[in-house]
Structure formats: structure tokens, C-alpha cells
Image: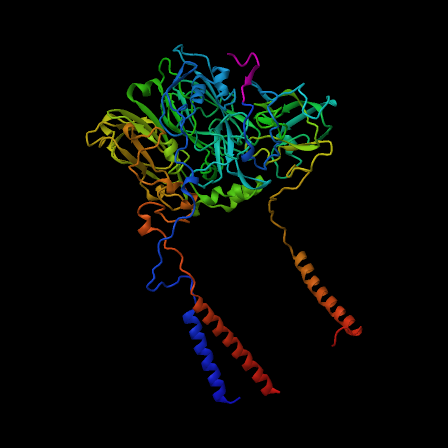
Amino acid sequence: MNKTGVLIVVLSLVILLWGAVSIFPWVNGQSGVAIPPTAELEGNESSMEKLCGVKSDKWRVEREVDGVVVAESRRCLPDNPWEVAAVVKGTNNISMMALMNTRLASDAVIKQNDLDGDGDPDEIHIKLEVAELNGSSPDGDFFLPTYDIAPGIQPGLWVFAPKTRGMAAINLFSYEAIPELRAPSPVIRVERGDSVKITLENTHYLPHTIHLHGVDHPYINQQGRGNDGVPVTDEPPVMPGESKTYSLKPRQTGTMFYHCHVQTDKHLMMGLQGMFVVEENRPNNWLQTLNIGAGHVRHSSVAVNESYDHEYDLHYQNIDKELNEIIQSTNDPRLIAKKMNREYDITQASPDYFLLNGHSFPYTLRDSLIVADPNGRIKLRIVNGQSDIVAVHTHGHKATVTHNDGIKMPEATQLTRDVYDLAPAQRADLSLSTTDDGLHSYGPGVWLFHNHAEKGITTGGRGPGGDISMIVYRSFLQPDGMPKLQGADVSRFLDPRYYAGDVSVWGRSSEARSLGEPSLVRPNLVAIVALGLMIGLILGLVYWMHRARKRLVR
Amino acid sequence: MNLEKSSIVILMWLLSGIVFGEQEIERFSISPLQGESKVRMRHSMDVHGMVMNENKDVLPEGCDKISGDIDITVSAGRKFAEKFNGKTFAYDQQQWNMQPCSRVTVRFINDDPIRHQFMIHGLPRYLYPPSGMFHIELTGPGEKTATFILPAEQKTYLVHCELTQHMENGMKAQIKVGEGDGDLPSIPGLTAEVTPDRYPINWTWKPAVIFAISIILGLIVLRLIKSRLVATGLIRR
């Protein structure tokens, strides 16, 4: 073969390659004149989960159980009134029929002995277990018991749980956790001067403690053992299968905090944290010792009832997926401890999920609405259990911060504002007035309240999610406890595909036609055939050249 | 009502005609609801714990009489898991073999100052309503004794503690009636896990050398095979 021949072959190869590249059907197709229409959303709306789905008012109405008045709670998922009554009277004093309507163990909250003779029991013994939610199993690829913080989102969690009985799943046919096993750990309420014992029954496979943050407690407990729950200064942590009783007689009131102090940067963030409230000592002050899942207090203290119409506990948490996935990746506690304590690094963490009372929007609408009446006063207690600052903003309202970290502020320094910022572990008590004066309230409506540190309103980076909830005036409330949203379509947020990022933000709404997802463009078959032919030609030419060279050599 | 003093038996009026059929999952082998429930769910509870569906005398279908009385003592606690690597809780035994139609009296002992359970699933739902469960629970250290009657069929029953992660961390056992119908997975020291953990491997120079030698051996074997085949004339050189 002469030089001209080689030149021709090489030249045609270059032309063919250029042609192949230019007609290569890239991932994104060009549309030309025919711009693709908006895709129809797959799936049937009617098969989707309902925003509430609970029609029965059985748990919502005001009810007297064994002489305990349990206030009305107009939320989709209110607290079980029998359970509220059981922790008000004590599981040792409540009737067996009422206790059977709960899942509490008979020794969950023991109340006895009116030491100061003012009509309420002053010896309180609370038992807490440690439950794992969305944990793994050696029996297959599933989590149990399951606890969804938002549609389709099941991060592994550890919580202090009230001592229950029976199964951890709602029934034999489901993996779903019973309502008592949930985030956050229950709010504990005791009276100033009560003789309180808190027994940690460590039902978990790792060591834990309880540290009473801000609650007056002696350094040494009644048995002469450490009482601060800090392994570094105190004593060894409570090992799996062991129990330990912390004792206290708080001399000061206020909204406080409790959490596990073993490997705190991991265990606290895994969910072992709860609100602790010391109420003023009043006659006949029967307290709701546990507020499971925080939120609405259905049996407030005498002192709170004197000044407020309603009381809500608001617990903010965040979750770093990388930490919480560890307990779902393996079963052996040694491997979990290694991954968590030696491989995971909180200084590299970026939180993915943001919870208000254990749920993210839209599930917050089911159990964390603040239901308001005009011309009323609502007490809000906020604890920041997150690793970052929270800046809670109330739409339509400016509330007054009455207490910081449980300490009452002098009247002159009580600030009325619309963003309440809390550093990690801080608490604030707010007085929310619903008087329509343009300052405290702009009037009845459905008013959002959310963390204004903008990450906080997302779920895995997708919004609206996170800790968004609403202040809803009664006239804007539907019978099932859902807010009247003036026709807005919130069903799209119940689709697990939404937070997985698989569907358009606009869902099936009226905006969907112009703002939804363009349907997929069909691949250009002519270009594919032409490309195939060209590649064939290139390969043929190369082979032919190779043969020709071989023959030449021979 | 004072719980300390007396154990109170509550009969729970449970529906005899609950339809679960559609929702059944493979988690526990649940026998189908055969006709009407013969009995209501039975539940006794006190401060020390509770017993569900004790049955001393109602015979399951297919049993003419009680074939025999079996007494077992089952201890639950952390110390029984010490012999199982990577497990936290366990019973003192992991398997029992029993004859069909036996009347079993379980003395359940809790050695830990936390809650433990002895829960059996898969019993006939008409006798152990609503879901075919016999259950003893202890709120702390102590013991409780209760009785149930095994059905006629050859079957393997799951025994476990249903506190979160207790079964997953070792508190799991099985009762084989007759020959049973197979083994359950993840029973400590007895059966393999379905999704076993992956453990780090101790890599040293030894396996590397063995690997290199294996490659050389493979080449030599290939050479030998080739020369054999050439010699027999099956292939040309």
C-alpha cells in the first residue's frame, strides 16, 4: 500500500469518527420544534395514604377516666386519654380496666405517699427502658419496629421509652411500632419538692445513662452511688440488662432536659434525649408525669392552668443519616460500636432530617398542631435537642419569652418577638397570646411555625418538610383535626417519592401542567442506525488496514 | 384497686370473627383461623408481669386427649448470652423437642433487673386468640408459671422476647413438635443468620504467598494438560 492509500484511509477514519461523535445520541435529547409535553404523574391518588385517616373522635373528646379529667385534644392523632390518666394517677393507682386500654406496664409510673399533705402524691417512681426503632434484623433485609418520621423515611433511632408491656409492634401482622415507642423520649413532669426516682432499665445492647440537664439533683444518689449520669466523673454506665435508679428532690422549677451521657455526641443525637419539667408545688396538683411524644399536654399543672388555656411541649431534633444508618447496617453490637465510635465523625456531619416532636412535615400536622382560640393564652415549652441552633418563627404571632433555661426572666426583660433562637440544649418558655391586636396576633387563621434556619424546613434537602407545623384557630380546623388549607394540595407530600426526589414538586396541582416534569424524549432511531453503521465501517477499516500491513510484511 | 395484693384476671372480650387473612405476612407462620374461636383471649396481669392465653384443658382440634405433661424451666438473662459471640441476651436453652398434644407447663425465670418475655407464635388462633400467641412476661427479676397445650401437627414454633432488639440480639429459641417442620433462622449456636454480618479479615503476608503459589501451580497444570493432549493427538502443537 502506498502513502496516498494510507492517507485516504486515515482521513476517512477521522471523518467517520467526527460523524459518529456528532450524531451520538447523548443522554439528553434535543427537541427541535416538538418540545416534550408535561408528564403525567404515575400512581393512583386514591391509593395514597390519607393526611389524617382517623375519623373516630374517641380519643379527641374531653373525657374523665377514673376521676382524671383529660382535656379535649383536637388533633388527628391525640394522646391516648387512658394513658394520660394512667400517668396522672400512677399505673399503681389506676383501675385495671383503664390500664388495659394502655400499653403501659403496671410499674411504669408508681405514685404514692402525700408527704406534704396537700392532696397529691409526692413519691414518684418512673421507669424508663431504651427502645431501638427501625433497627436491623439477622432474619432478613427489613427494619423493626418501624417508625416513619416522614412518608417513606425510617432512620434508625434510640429512645428512652415508658415501660410498656406486650409486643413492640402494633400487631402480629405489622412491623409498625406501638405509639408508645417513638421519638422524642417522653417529657417528664414532676412537682417541686417531689421525691423522684427514675430507674433506667437498660433493655438495649449498649451501655447508657441518664443525665438530668438543668434539673436540681444531688451528685450522689440515695444508695451512695453517682447520680449525674456522666461516665467520666460518675461511675460506669448502666450495662445492657442492668438497671440503675437516679434520685432527686428538685428545689427549683423550670423547663429542663435529660439525655444519655455515654458517647454523648452519638447517643444524644441517636434520640436519647427528652424534656424534663419541674412544676410549681400546689395543692391537688396531679401531674401528667409522662407526655409521650411531647406535644399537647392534656392534663396541665394547677399553676399552668391558672395562667394559660393550653400547654404544648415542643421538642426539636435533627438527624444525620450517616450516624443513624449504622444500626441498620449490621447486627453485632461490637461492629455497631466500632462504626459509631471509631469510624463515624460528628465533625464531618451534616444533618439530613429535622424533627418537631419526632415527626417531619407533613406528619407534624397529625400530632403537633397548636390549636388556638381567640383571646386566649397558650404556654409553649421549647427544647432544642439539635446539634445546631434553632430559630423558631411563628407566623402571625409575636410571643413573649417568659423563661430561659427554666429561669423566669424579670418582667422588664421578657422580650416579645417573632423568632425565638435557642442554642443546642437550651430551653425557652413562651407565652403566646391570641388577642387580635396586630402585635401578639394578626387574627384567626392557619399560621405556619417553623425553624427559620432554612435547613430545618427540609427533609433530605427537599422542602417543605422538616419541622414545619401550624398554629390553627379552631374555626380553621376540620373535624378530623386537619387544618382547612383553602384548597391547597398537600397530598403530594404524602408520596414517599416526593422526599426521595423522584417526582416533580408540583405533583398533581393546578401548576403541574406548566411546571411539572417534561416527559421523556424518544431516542432518535435514525441517528442510532447511522451511528451503528459508522462504527461498523470504522472497525472494518481498521481490520482491513491490519490485514494489509501483515500481508506487506510477509 | 391494688395491684400489689392480688393478681387480677381480666377477660378481654375479643372478637371471634376477626378477619386477618389478607394482611398475613411471612414473619410468623400463622395458622388460618379455623371456624369460630373456641375461647376468648385470656389475660392475667400483676406488678410482676402477665400471662396471656393460658390453657390447661381445652384440646386443640385433632387431639383426642393430652398425650403427656411436660414441665420445662426457662431462664432468660444476659448471662446466658455470654457463650454466644456478638449476642447480648439469651434463654438458657435454644430448642425443645415435644410430642404433639402435650400439655406444657413453663416455669419462666427472669434473671435480669429489666423486662423479658417468653412469647410463642403460630399456635391455633381459635384457641389462642386473636393471633395464636401464648405469652409470659416478667417486669423484672422473678418467675411465673403458665400452661398451654400443643396442637396435633408436626411444626416448629418460634419462642422469643419481643422487646426491641432482644430476639435480634439472641433471645430466640424454637419448640419442635414431633419432627417439626424445619428450623428457624438466627437461633444462637443452632442455625445461621439470613443476613449475616460481615467481619473484618485478618490479612497477613501468608495468604498473599499462597495466592502467588496457586497461580504458578495453575500454569504448571495447564502446561501438563496441554502436553498430554498433544501426545494423544487430540490437538496439534
Residue A329: x, y in percent? 54, 44
Q: Nearer the viewer, residue A549 or A399?
A: A549
Numbered range of the magenta stretch: B1-14
A292 or A523: nearer the viewer: A523
Q: How is the image coloured?
A: rainbow
Residue that extends furthest to the left in the rendered view of this protein: A437
> What is the tally of numbered marks visible in this picture?
0
* Location of residue A554 (image quadrant): bottom right
Q: Is residue A233 positioned above or below A110 on the image?
A: below
Residue at the extreme right: B232
Would you say A251 lies left or right of B28 here? left
Identify the main secondary structure in magenta. loop
Q: Residue A160: x, y in percent?
A: 48, 30
| Residue A169 part of the magenta segment | no
Q: Is residue A350 visible?
A: no
Q: Is A156 situated above or below B116?
A: below
Report x, y in % for residue A200.
51, 27
Q: Position of residue A326 (x, y in %)?
A: 51, 43
Q: Nearer the viewer, residue A297 or A28?
A: A28
Residue B156 occupies which quadrant of the picture? Answer: top right
- Residue B191, picture quadrant: top right
Which quarter of the figure is the C terminus of chain B placed in?
bottom right
What residue sits 43% from the left and 12% below the top? A115
Q: Residue at the spot x=34%, y=17% of the render? A: A302
Magenta-colored stretch includes residue B6: yes
Q: Residue furthest bottom?
A: A2
Compare residues A75 and B31 and report the one nearer the observer. Answer: B31
Residue lying furthest front: B35
Residue A418 vs residue A537: left or right? Answer: left
